[in-house]
Image (tube, rainbow, N blue to C red):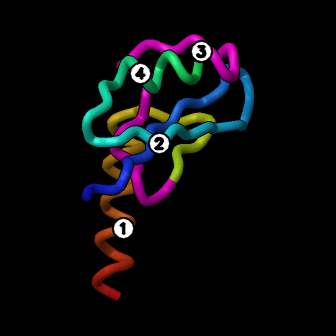
Amino acid sequence: METPRRIFASYPDSPLCFCDYAFPDEKLFESRERFRDLLELHVKEEQLDTASESQPCTYKTCGSDSARADVRKKNVLQNVI
């Protein structure tokens, strides 16, 4: 059985970043709906960060391609050291 993955979304004009847990059989829009229903946070699917599983996003970089690349690079370096 696979474990759920974390989906991140940042709250507009705030340093807060929230995550949802999505099981392998769930679609991305289901996480988006949970953010909307629970937090009244309206985000588009492309604004959701699915690549930062091991380290949450930050206010200024949540969901950006460069932020995800930086997180992956940092994780690789931590595993090497």
For the N terminus, the quadrant is bottom left
* For marks 1 and 3 on the same chain, the one whose residue lies earlier in the sequence: 3
* Residue highlighted by disc 2: 21
Q: Which residue is mark 4?
A: 30
Mark 3 secondary-structure assignment: helix
- Dot 1, how many residues are within 10 Å of its Cα: few (below 14), some (14-19), or many (20+)? few
Residue at horizontal 45%, vertical 26%? 31
Q: Amino acid at mark 4?
A: Glu
**Residue nearest the viewer, comparing 32 with 15:** 32
Quarter of the image for the C terminus: give it: bottom left
Q: Is residue 48 magenta?
A: yes
Residue neighbourhood size for the residue with mark 4, other residues' Cα within 10 Å, grouped as few (<14), some (14–19), many (≥20):
few
Along the viewing direction, whichever of 38 and 74 lies nearer the viewer: 38
Residue 49 spot, x, y in % from top left: 41, 35
Hey, what amino acid is under mark 3?
Arg
Label 3: which residue? Answer: 36
| Distance of label 4 from label 1 (alpha carbons) | 28 Å
Residue hosting label 1: 75
Up-down relation of residue 31 to residue 73 (above or below): above
For the magenta stretch, what is the residue range? 36-55
Q: Earlier in the sequence, mark 2 or mark 3?
A: 2
In this view, which residue lies farthest toward the right?
Answer: 14
Q: Residue furthest bottom?
A: 81
